[in-house]
Image (tube, rainbow, N blue to C red):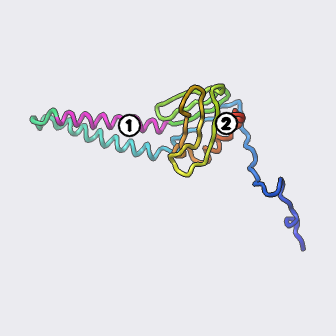
């Protein structure tokens, strides 16, 4: 007996891959993407390293009175360790706050402590790739009058987030897809 599924023909042209259904994107609201979810381990590592540097620096600074011949050396080393720890904490907070927001006015990007707003009229082209390595660009936005594009690496945005970003960018600026 022949089952009806044996007679079913694939919808579309033969030999072509079936593309997933287009994702509905509401262009009247802002679409936020937070990259801290992917960067939290790197940020946590920086927090721990910064805390260790601050602890060592503060310990050395408290020992200045017990070593009168090495006051200058200990003060300098303790100060440098403490400043290095504060700098690492500052960078770690930037990893936790990395985000992108796409709305009808343009794209707001927060990568570390660098913040920028790119209106749609200034976007020359954009692309979303599936890189093989974490440090390669995954989302690239070319901006008018800037030599370097805005780049979001695969280490910052996972595959699902990249697909969502691509769907939203297509909804707002399909003609600028590269």
- Residue 12 to residue 64: above or below: below
Pick the residue in front: 113 or 121: 121
What residue is shown at x 68% (from left), y 34% (from top)? 176
Span colored in magenta: 73-97
Pick the residue in front: 9 or 66: 9
Q: Position of residue 163 (x, y in %)?
A: 64, 45
Q: Main secondary structure of the magenta part?
A: helix
Q: Earlier in the sequence, mark 2 or mark 1?
A: 1
What kind of element bears circle 1?
helix
Q: Position of residue 91 (x, y in %)?
A: 41, 36
- Alpha carbons under labels 2 and 1: distance apart: 33 Å
What residue is shown at x 63% (from left), y 26% (from top)? 122
Q: Quadrant of residue 29?
A: top right
Q: Quadrant of the C terminus?
A: top right
What residue is shown at x 75% (from left), y 54% (from top)? 17
What residue is shown at x 37% (from left), y 38% (from top)? 88
Name the residue beneath numbered marker 2.
Answer: 169
Q: Residue furthest bottom?
A: 1
Q: Badge 1, how many Cα within 10 Å: few under 14, some, many 20+?
A: many
Q: Position of residue 95 (x, y in %)?
A: 46, 39
Q: Nearer the viewer, mark 2 or mark 1?
A: 2
Name the residue beneath numbered marker 1.
Answer: 89
- Residue 116 within the segment the image draws in magenta: no
Q: Position of residue 129 (x, y in %)?
A: 61, 45
Q: Badge 2, how many Cα within 10 Å: few under 14, some, many 20+?
A: many
Q: Quadrant of residue 48?
A: top left
Q: Quadrant of residue 52?
A: top left
- Residue 78 within the segment the image draws in magenta: yes
């Amino acid at each position: 007996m022949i089952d009806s599924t044996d007679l079913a023909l694939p919808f579309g042209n033969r030999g072509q891959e079936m593309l997933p259904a287009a994702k509905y994107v509401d262009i009247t609201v802002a679409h936020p993407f937070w990259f801290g979810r992917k960067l939290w381990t790197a940020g946590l590592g920086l927090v721990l390293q910064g805390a260790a540097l601050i602890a060592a620096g503060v310990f050395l600074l408290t020992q200045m009175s017990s070593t009168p011949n090495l006051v200058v050396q200990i003060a300098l080393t303790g100060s440098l360790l403490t400043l290095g720890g504060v700098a690492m904490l500052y960078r770690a907070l930037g990893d936790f706050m990395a985000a992108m927001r796409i709305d009808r006015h343009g794209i707001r990007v927060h990568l570390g402590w660098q913040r920028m707003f790119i209106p749609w009229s200034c976007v020359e082209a954009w692309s979303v790739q599936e890189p093989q390595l974490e440090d390669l660009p995954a989302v690239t936005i070319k901006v008018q009058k800037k030599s370097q594009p805005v780049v979001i690496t695969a280490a910052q945005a996972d595959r699902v987030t990249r697909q969502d970003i691509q769907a939203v960018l297509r909804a707002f600026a399909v003609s600028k897809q590269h």
